[in-house]
Image: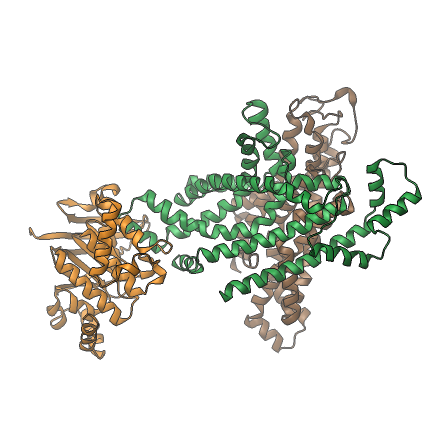
Chain colours: A green, B brown, C orange
Amino acid sequence: MRLVFSMIGKRITQLLIMFLLLSFITFVLMKLTPGDPVRTILNVEDVSTTTAQEELIKQQYGFDRPILIQYGEWLSNVVQLDLGESIIAKQPVLQLIINRLPASVALTIGGLVALLVIAVPFSVLAAIYENKWPDYLCRGVAIIGASIPSFWLGLLLIFFFSLQLNLLPVMGRGTLAHYILPSVTLGMAMAPVYIKLLREQLIDILQSSYIESAIARGIPRWRILLFHAIRGSLIPLVTMFGLSIGSLLGGITVIEMLFSWPGMGELIVNAVTQRDYPLIQGYIIVVGSLVVFINLLVDLITMLINPQIMQEARRAQ
Amino acid sequence: MKKGNATLFNLPITTKLGITLVSFLLILIFFGEWIMPYDPFQIDMNNRLESMSHQHWLGTDQLGRDIFSRIVYGAKLTIGLGVITIILSVIVGVPIGLISGFSGGKIDAVFMRIIDAILTFPDFILAIAIAGLLGPSLTNIVIAIVLVRWIVYARLVRSQVLELKQQEYILASKISYSSKWRTIRMHILPHLIPTIIAIGAVDVGKVILLISSLSYIGLGAQPHIPEWGAMLNDGRGYFQVVPALMMYPGLAIMLTVLIFHLLGDGLKNRFDIRKRGLRK
Amino acid sequence: MKDQLISIEHLFVTLNGSHQPLLEDVNLTIKMGEMVGLIGESGSGKSLTSRAVTGLLPKEMRVSGRISYGGNNLLELSDKERYKQLGIKIGYIFQDYRGSFTPFIRIGKQMTETIRTHIKLTKKQSEQLAREVLNEVGLEDKTIYHRFPFQLSGGQIQRAAVAMTLALKPELIICDEMTTALDVITGEKVLNYLAKVQKETGCAVLIITHDLAQAYKHTNRIYVMQQGRIVEEGLSEEVRCHHKHPYTKKLCSCLLALPGEDLITTASQVMVK
């Protein structure tokens, strides 16, 4: 139990450090920006600008006060979960982000499913036929896969399956069919790293003494593979997922843009093009917290699976 | 390191392939301007969206610009940016790693905390943030990536320093009152340089992917610039009509990144580099 | 010759691409219900011999000779046919108890999985059988059945492995250094349960060990192996008192230098009620 608390403690310190770093960087950067946010606001509202109006806006948004005071104020608001209001949408930033969260989570889950469907068979084949042609083929596929930009992969999939074959819908999010292309793109983009890891894991496990025991007990090969080897190799995958959640959140942004998926990624890219500063800031804070939170969750899950099991599994190899 | 004596001729086939292809890329970068048949920025509304021909080897885009010339020009830009980003990351990361590893104690602890915190934060998101706050441009993207990438090298150097600190010849050089700088130069850098080059090569590939992705969503290179990701973004509306607009820049990215992967993997094998120091 | 269960004749094992055989002209027979010891230092080829019998040798090794079992030459059977015999005809217990069971699956589940692979039973019946045999080797089924392997001690795991063979009633059990990773007293306890199982089922047992005292105590006949050859064979008492080969002599003299086989025996008798 003490371990759990120390872990949570470690993650919270991490969160705080990251939070301070990020908020400070974003805040300073914002003040250095060439584009004047006041102009942005006025442009959006499409009024002819006068100095009086500019002053009014400056006062309204507090841009006229010293930076450190602005920073402190903003920080105290953030702690109270108030991330400010979007300049463009005129809605609370937190609300906007939360509205987009389900779509992104759904796409992530779809991507993970696709990832497993793609990575497991490949790595199993590669591990069983280690250093034979299926292994070389899988390794080749993995290294080429790691070189393909995900958005181009998505474009190719759209081109073949939607435009040429007319099988699947391209844009938006509605039916289950809408999930297929974005999920597969995301899964394929993540797959190479996981294939590499899983293959190494499986090769180790297949040579372990407990697999030999299972063989000596006469258990059918497919059962050994499925319930003893593959299952064992999936345990470290949870940790791997925690480590790669950051790049996943990045990768998902591109895919959301590509498929006009109404998730957080699309929100933020639009916010950037429209220079919606509070939204950008809020997004960074939310994503940062999300990453740390998911890592904490992954830690807890691995503990729940029982650290000793993992330890034992590792030692037995 | 016995393997260090390998000559160009007994390298593994993947490395040979990697080196050949890299030389090919280098030729593209340095002599591209002689190869280019057209000015990559030249708009020619009379020859829009042409397919492959003797005049235009890979056809033209929606503004009549020669695709082949744009891709050749883009090679210089895309690869150059990748290499510069990694060099900058090395310049930032290596000294920090050395300081952190050598001083140990509190300084090391503070560095490690900061590194852990940044590490959890995705480079892609930071790039978006910086692009959002400073405005989308290639310079800002490079800054954003360097802000995250240096960590890889700092950690690498730090763990190597910690490992080497335990070894006898370092102790011996300490006893013989060699200066720290001398120890670093004589004993640590020779071990580090091959590792950094091998990992850097793979990283250049990764950075190229990252930059092109950001350009594709409009946060990197602006549309008229023939960066490969931006070219894909630029021609998005015409894919259905002219698939070539989509095929060639994508293929260019893929092949380039693949080359750097092969090169990096080959170097890793050659220098017998394990994954130490890259994971927690 | 009728009561012969298995007989190994002129067995050679060679690593591909090498001329020096790892096993050279090994001849070994086991009768029904017999307990046979195979002793020698590590690297002498004991485990290779037993693996040649089960077909668990690495693929890079070539085998020649003859292993007669149940009227067949095992070396001529297909992989599939040989595989069918594992577990049900030939039981195998390994040295490293951590590798005896898969670490992240509960003991009970692995036992029923094995039982149902070989015997047509319902889930309930196989669970009952598993619990019965666990009790037979002195393990409490209520606790052990739902445990993960890492939650058990080495002795408990090896006893569970013995229980496993008891459930399947194979004709031959091969114990490859099964007690080496255990302390002496726990090891004796496991061996005593093995002897009990042997008496109940009447199966033959091949005990592979480097521990002479153990071999004398538990076996009827002994083969001594050195550098891939059988250098001596005979009844346990014979080998102990009238050994001919200098290597056996060396092994025995080491034994005499140790204080107490008798001590061990009494200690283990105390342990097993």
Q: Residue at x 23, y 52 (%)?
A: C128
Figure quadrant of residue A276: top right
**From the viewer's perspective, is B8 left or right of A224?**
right
Q: Position of residue B7 (x, y in %)?
A: 56, 51
- Visible residue check, residue A43: yes
> For the view shown, which residue lies furthest in the right direction?
A51
Figure quadrant of residue B73: top right
Q: Position of residue A3 (x, y in %)?
A: 51, 65
Query: Is C105 rendered above or below residue B191?
Result: above
Q: Position of residue A96 (x, y in %)?
A: 68, 42
- Visible residue check, residue C56: no
In this rendered view, identify the residue nearer to me: B170 or A232.
A232
Q: Residue at x 13, y 63 (%)?
A: C221
Q: Residue at x 14, y 56 (%)?
A: C201
Q: Residue at x 14, y 52 (%)?
A: C7
Q: Position of residue A294 (x, y in %)?
A: 57, 52
Task: Indicate the quadrant containing the C terminus of chain A: top left, top right, bottom left or bottom right.
Answer: bottom left
In this rendered view, identify the residue nearer to me: C165 or A93.
A93
Figure quadrant of residue B164: bottom right
> For the view shown, which residue lies furthest in the left direction?
C2
**From the viewer's perspective, is B265 left or right of C220?**
right
